[in-house]
Image: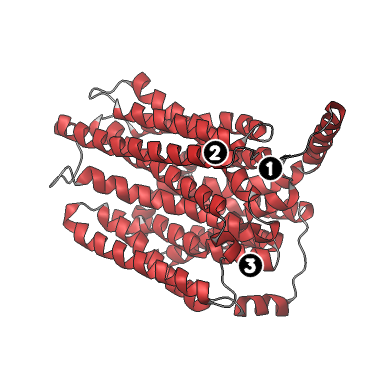
Amino acid sequence: MMGIKYRKGDVRMHSKFMENEFIKQIPILIGLGMFSLLTSISGSSTNLALPKISEDLKITNGQSTWIIQIGLIVSAITFVLFGRLGDSISKTFIFTNGGIIFLVGSLITGMALDFPIIMLGRAIQSLGVAMIMANSLGIVSQYFSNETRGEALAIISMFISIGAISGPALGGIILSFTSWRWIYLFNIPLGIIIIFFSRKQLAVPKVPLKTLSNEIKSINWFGELTFAVGLTLFFLSGVYFQKGLNFFVVGLTFLIIGTVIAFAAFFQDRKFHDSLISNELVKNADYLLSISILLVVMLVNSMSNILLPFYLQSYGGISPFVSGLLLMVQSLTMLIISPISGYISDHWNRYDLTIIGLLVLLISQVGYVMYPRNINLLIVSIPIIVNGIRLGLFLSPNNAIIMGVVDESLSGVAGSLTSFARTLGVTIGISFSSILLFVQLPHVQRITPALGQKFMNAFVSVFVVATVISAVVLVAVIFRRIQNKNAI
C-alpha cells in the first residue's frame, strides 16, 4: 500500500492471507461469472438468429435489427438507475432479481409469435441484463479487497469472453438442429440453477415492500425519462447513419437533438435533491478520466468489429464461417490474457499496465492500416490477435482502477456508469466508423470486390483516424500516470 513499508515476513503473511481470502470468495465469483456468461451467450447468439427470426415472424431484415437495438437502448437507459438502487437498497438484491427478470424476458422472447411480443420480451430481458451488469462490479468491490480486485475482475472478463466465443457456436448448433427459439429458452433451466447458486453464495437481504416503494418514489423520474428520450434519439441516429448518405441529415439531426436532451437531463439531475449520480463521482477526476478512456477504447474496438466483416466478406469474398472464426480469435486471445493480466494488476502498478494495453491498442490499429488489398489470412489475423491481447491487458486493471478510486457506498452507481460507458463507446464507434466509411463511398449501396482500391482507401482512412484516437488516449493515460506516480 502507498506510504506503508512491510518487513519481508509481514509481506509474505499478508500475501498468504489475501490469497486465502480470495480462495474463500471463489464461489461468489462463479455466481457473478455464470450470469455474465449467460447474458453474453444470449447477446452474441442473437445476431446469428436474426435471419431465421425474420423468416419465422415474417418481418423484414431491417425490422429484425431492432431486436438488437431495443436491447442496447433499454440497457443503456437503465444502467445508472439500477446502480443507484443497488447502492441505496442492496446490490445483491438488484443483481439476483435482475437474473429473474432476464429469465422472464427470455421466456417471452422464446415464445413470441409476432414482432411486438418479441420486442417486449427483448426489452424485459435487457432490463434484467442492466440490473445484472449495473451491480456486478459493485459486488466485486463489496466482496474483494483492492489487493485482489484485479484478479476477480479478470475472472469475470473470462466468463464474458467464453460467452462471446461460445455464443455463435452454440447458436449455430441450435439453428442447425432446432428452432431459433431455443437460443432464448435454453437460458431458463440454466438460469434457474445459477439463481439458486448465487442466492446461496451472496448475502441477499429481504427488502420490505415499503422500503422498495419509498426508494422508487425518491428517484428523479423526470430526469430519467428525459435522459431516456435523449439517449433513444442518440441511438436512433446510428441506425440512420448506417443506411448511407441519403439518411445522413436525418441521422445528424437525431444525434444533435439526442445529445442536447441527454445533457439537459444530466444538468437537471444535478439540481435534484437526491440525484442519481453523486457529486463525489462528478468531482472525482481520476474516476471520470478512467471511464472516459474506457469509452474511447470501446469506441475504437467497435470500429474494427463493424468494419472487418465488410473487408473479409463483402470485399474479400471470404465465407461468413471463416470470417467468424477469424474474429473469434480476438475473444479467445482475451480469454487467455485476462487472468494473467488480472493477477499482474494485483501485484504491479495498474496504471502502468493500462499504458501497456493502450500501446498494444495503438499497434493493432497500425496493423489494420497496413491490411493488404489482396487478403492474406496470416497478415489479417495478426492485428486481430494483438487487439485481443490489448483487451486482456487493459480492461481488468482499468476496471480495478475505476472501482478502487470510489467509495464502496457509491460502487453501484460507479459500476453502472462503467457499463454505460462501454455500451456508449460501442454505439458511437459503430455509427462513427460507418459514417467515415460510407462518406468516402458516395452512392455505394453494397460493398463488393469490384470497388477495389476505392474501398481500400476508405477502409484504411477509417483506421488512420482510429490510430490517431488511440495515440491521444495513450498520451492521456501517460499524463495520468505522471500525476499519480505513487498510485497502486
**Residue found at x 37% / y 51%:** 428
Residue 200 visible within the image: yes
Q: How crowded is mark 2: few (under 14 residues within 10 Å), some or many (20 or more)?
A: some
Q: Which of the two residues, 245 or 201, is positioned nearer the viewer here?
A: 245
For this view, does 163 lie left or right of residue 239?
right
**Residue found at x 52% / y 53%:** 288
Residue beneath disc 2? 481
Give amino acid for label 2: Arg
Q: Element type at marker 3?
A: helix
Q: Which of the two residues, 19 or 105, is positioned nearer the viewer here?
A: 19
For this view, does 454 lie left or right of residue 206?
left
Residue beneath disc 3? 85
Q: How crowded is mark 1: few (under 14 residues within 10 Å), some or many (20 or more)?
A: many
Give the mark nearest the N terminus, 3 or 2: 3
Q: In the figure, residue 441 lies in which quadrant?
A: top left
Residue beneath disc 1? 149
For this view, does 357 lie left or right of residue 397?
left
From what the image shows, is residue 85 above or below residue 8?
below
Disc number at residue 218?
Answer: none
